Image (spheres, rainbow, N blue to C red):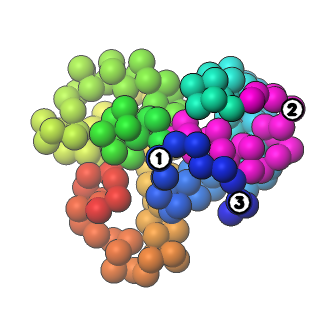
């Protein structure tokens, strides 16, 4: 992973790598059909808001050509979402993929996996958008692979981390 400036609380490296694997397959120049750019597939409007919130300059052209810049803004966005959702990787991923409004709607509809109202795996299976449901599953599987590579297999398969959808 390229070096980048940390402008927010640190984010688990395995989580960042797992997300990048799913978003762009590590292709810096990737651009989605809706305009998301770079390694972390950041929407320019979102990137502008993140940059402003963290006192950074904004340059849309750098999102798809400067890996460090993309990671700086993307990891700040992840950090902000993790803080908003009390460390829940699952809710953070849903917000990253489908937007925070969907998280609010689905927590109201199905219960909150952070409180034990519903098991995390059942909550993910209840996500009504096939794309988002698959996205969460794939990123979480990627996270386990990268944890195993970075931390060793015992840490990667911690039941607490898998059930809670966050670093255990």
Whether residue 21 appears in magenta in the rendering, the answer is no
**Residue 70 against residue 44 in the figure, above or below:** below
Q: Residue at x 27, y 26 (%)?
A: 107
Q: Residues within 10 Å of mark 3 (few under 14, many from 20)?
A: few
Tag 3, which secondary structure? loop
Residue at the disc numbered 3: 3
Q: Which residues are magenta?
A: 57-78
User: In this orientation, does residue 43 appear?
Assistant: no
State which tag comes first along the sequence, 3 or 2. 3
**Residue 128 against residue 70 in the figure, above or below:** above
Q: Residue at x 23, y 27 (%)?
A: 110
- Give the Cα separation between the discs numbered 3 and 2: 19 Å
Position in image of residue 40 (x %, y %): 66, 44
- Give the Cα separation between the discs numbered 3 and 1: 16 Å
Q: Quadrant of the N terminus?
A: bottom right
Taking the image as shown, residue 8 lies to the left or right of residue 44, namely left
């Amino acid at each position: 992973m390229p070096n980048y400036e940390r402008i927010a609380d640190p984010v688990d490296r395995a989580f960042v790598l797992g997300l990048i694997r799913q978003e762009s397959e590590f292709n810096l120049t990737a651009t989605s059909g809706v305009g998301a750019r770079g390694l972390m597939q950041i929407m320019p409007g979102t990137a502008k808001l993140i940059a402003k919130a963290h006192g950074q300059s904004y340059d849309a052209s750098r999102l798809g050509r400067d890996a460090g810049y993309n990671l700086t803004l993307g990891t700040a966005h992840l950090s902000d979402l993790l803080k908003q959702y009390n460390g829940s990787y699952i809710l953070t991923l849903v917000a990253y993929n489908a937007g925070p409004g969907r998280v609010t709607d689905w927590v109201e509809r199905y219960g909150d996996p952070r409180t034990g109202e519903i098991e995390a795996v059942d909550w993910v299976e209840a996500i009504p958008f096939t794309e988002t449901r698959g996205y969460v599953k794939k990123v979480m599987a990627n996270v386990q692979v990268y944890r195993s590579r970075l931390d060793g297999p015992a840490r990667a398969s911690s039941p607490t981390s898998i059930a809670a959808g966050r670093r255990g």
